Image (tube, grey):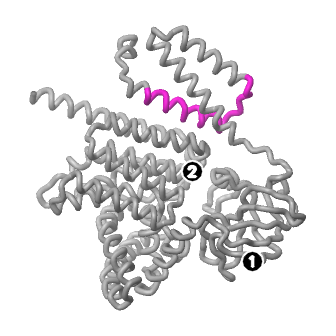
Amino acid sequence: MRKVFMALSRSKIFLCVCLSFCAGVGVGTLVSVPRTVLVMLAGASVVLVCVFWSQRLMRLLCLCVLFFISGIFRIQLTVHDPIQTDIDFYNGRTVRFLGMISSEPDVRQDSVKLSIEALTMGSGSRISGLVLMTVPMYPAYQYGNLLEITCEIETPGRIALDDGSSRVFDYGAYLSRYEIRSVCYRPVSVVLRGRGHGNWCMAGLLGIKNRFIRAMQEILPEPFSSLLGGILLGAKKAMPVSLMDGFNRTGITHIVALSGFNITIIAVALSALTQRISLPRRMSFFVSCAAIALFVVMTGAQASAVRAGVMGGLVLLGRGLGRLSRITNVLLLAATAMVLINPLVLMFDSGFQLSFLATLGLLYLSPIFEKWFKHPILPGWLSSTLAATLSAIFFTAPLIAYQFGRLSVVAPIVNMLVVPVISLTMGIGFGATVLAMIWLPLGQWVGWLVGLVLRYIVSVTELFSGFQYASITVTRMSWIWPVAWYASLVAGILYARYRQHATHEIKA
C-alpha cells in the first residue's frame, strides 16, 4: 500500500484534494459542525502536514483532511443571519418597498416569476436582498424595470409533491442557490416607477434574445415555435403542458433545457459532423466551441447556460486531448471552482449535478459505446451521437429517478430517434430565424423545412409517451440504489479500460 501512495502523481494528488473539498461541502450541508472544532482540526492538520512533509502518504492524508475541513467551512459561510437591512428580515409581514427586476422574467403558462432586487423600504431606508414575486401575465415587465411593490413576503419552505408519493421538495434550499430567501405570491400592488435601471450589457443581450424569439414566432406556429425556442434557447416555460409532459415521460426533456446534458450531446454530434465533412480536427474543435459560445450569448449568458457551455467545451477538449487523466483534472477543477463560488450548487442544484454526470458519461463511457456501434451501415457522426446519448442516459438516469421520482423506460429508444436530428434542427432553425429578422418571407420559407423536423420530434414524442408504461413513477427510492448503479458503472468502465490496455500489451 505504501508503494502505491509513493507512486501517486501530482495529478492524482490534485484529484484527491479537490474531491476532499467537495466532500467537505457535501458533509457540511448535511451536518452542523461548530466552528471552534473546525479551527482546531484545521490547525492540527497544518501542523501534521509540516511534521510529515517528507512522508508522502501522511502528507497527502493530512492535506485531504485540511481541504475537507475547508469545504465544511465554505458551506458554513453561506449561512445567512438576516439583519434589519435585509429584505428577508421582514418575512411574514406585509411591506412596501422599491425594487428592480434583476434577471429575465420567467414566463410560465399563466403567470410570470420576477426576481426583484430590493433597494429601499417605503420609509426610504436602504435594504438589500432578492424577492421572487409571482405576477399575472399582463402587464408585461422587463429586466431593469423599477417597481414599487406592496406585498406579504414569506420564507420559502417545503412543498409536498403531487406525484402520488410522500416526497417533499425543499423550495427554500432550491432558491437559496440564487440567494433568494423571500417569496411573494400575491402582491397587493405593483407600480412601475422606471425603466432601464439594469446592466446595459445584459439588457442588450436580452433584447437580442427577445427579438430572436419574436422572429421565431413569426415563422412557426405553436407548439413548434415554443419547441424551437426551447431547443435553441432553453426557453421551455411557455411550452404546452401536454408536450412537456410527453418529454418527461419519454426522457428527452434535456433537449429543451439549459444543461450540460443537452450541450455536451449536441457538441459531440456537431464535432463528429464537422469532421465528417472533412474539416481538420483542430478546425472542428474551434467551430464546435464557437457554436457553444454563440448558444451561451443567445440565451442571455445566464449562469446555467455558462455552466452548460463550460461542460460542453470540456467534453470537446477531452476528446481532442485523448488523455482522460488530463481532462479529468480539468473537469474536476471546473466543478470545484463552481462549488467554491457557490457551494449550494453541489447538493441543491440538479442542473449542476446532471451536467457533471452527463459530462463524465461522455468522457468515460461514450468511447466504449462508440466501439460497439462501429458498423459500416452507420455513418460515423450517427454512431458518435448514439454513443453520446446512451452514455449521458446511463449516467443521469439514477439521479433523475432518485430526485424526481420518475424513470422513463422508453428514453433510450426515443433519444436515439430524436437526438440525431437535434443538431440539424438547431442549424436550420437558427438560420431560418436570422433570415426572418432580415427578410421575413425568406425566413418563413426556410422555417417550413425546420417545421418538418420539429413535427417529426413531436410525433415521436406523442407516439411513445402514449404507451402505458412509457414512464415509471419511483416512490421512496433508497439512496443505496443510485450508489450501487454508479459503483457498477465505475467497475465496468475500469474493467473495459483494463481489457483495452491488456489487449494493447499483447499486440505489442
Q: CA distance from mark 2 to mark 1?
A: 33 Å
Q: Main secondary structure of the magenta part?
A: helix
- 394 relative to 482 in the view: left or right: left
Determine whether the residue tagged by mark 2 lies in a helix, strand or loop. loop
Name the residue furthest bottom: 441
From the viewer's side, name the closer residue of 459 and 34. Answer: 34
Q: Quadrant of residue 51?
A: top right
Q: Earlier in the sequence, mark 2 or mark 1?
A: 1
Q: In the rendered view, would you say 288 is above or below 2? A: below
Q: Residue at x 31, y 53 (%)?
A: 388
Q: Which mark is residue 192?
A: 1
Screen quadrant of the N terminus: top left
Q: Residue type at mark 1?
A: Leu
First to last magenta residue range: 14-36
In the displayed structure, 269 sits above or below 354; it is below
Image coords of residue 165 (percent x, y): 62, 56
> For the residue labelled by badge 1, is the local secondary structure a helix, a strand or a loop?
strand
